[in-house]
Image (cartoon, rainbow, N blue to C red):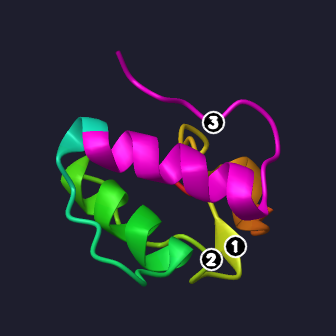
Amino acid sequence: MGVTVKGYKRGPKLFSLARKKALALEVPQEKGVKLAELISRIQIKEGNPPCFQQRDVCSQKDCCWQASCNVAMVEEQQ
């Protein structure tokens, strides 16, 4: 059973969601890990680029974190 982001989440709710997903994927979560770092580790484990809140624009329309990332979405260039 996977955990998905539905809608826009921030703060403790987003962190809780990330922790649950990290547990399901067996991603390490030491005490004090920052939210962006945890989500980047999850992205790597899923085979995606670790880009949460690290870009100005994004074309990853299937990313489950995009609603909380605060990045401008653009059409993918072909």
Q: Is residue 7 above or below residue 36?
A: above
Q: Quick one: label 2 or label 3, which is nearer the N terminus? A: 3
Tag nearer the camera, 1 or 2: 2
Residue 2 horizontal/vertical position (percent): 39, 23
Q: Is residue 34 left or right of residue 48?
A: right
Please report the residue visible at 70 percent of the width from the left and 64 percent of the height from the top: 69
Tell me the magenta residue range: 1-23
Residue 50 horizontal/vertical position (percent): 37, 70
- Tell me the CA gap for discs 1 and 2: 10 Å
Name which residue type carries label 1: Val
In the rendered image, residue 19 lying in the magenta stretch gets the answer yes
- Mark 3: secondary structure: loop
- Mark 1: secondary structure: strand
Tag nearer the camera, 3 or 1: 3
**Circle number at residue 57:** 1
Q: Is residue 53 left or right of residue 47?
A: right
Residue marked by disc 3:
5
Tag nearer the camera, 2 or 3: 3
Viewport quadrant of the N terminus: top left
Q: Is residue 19 left or right of residue 75?
A: left
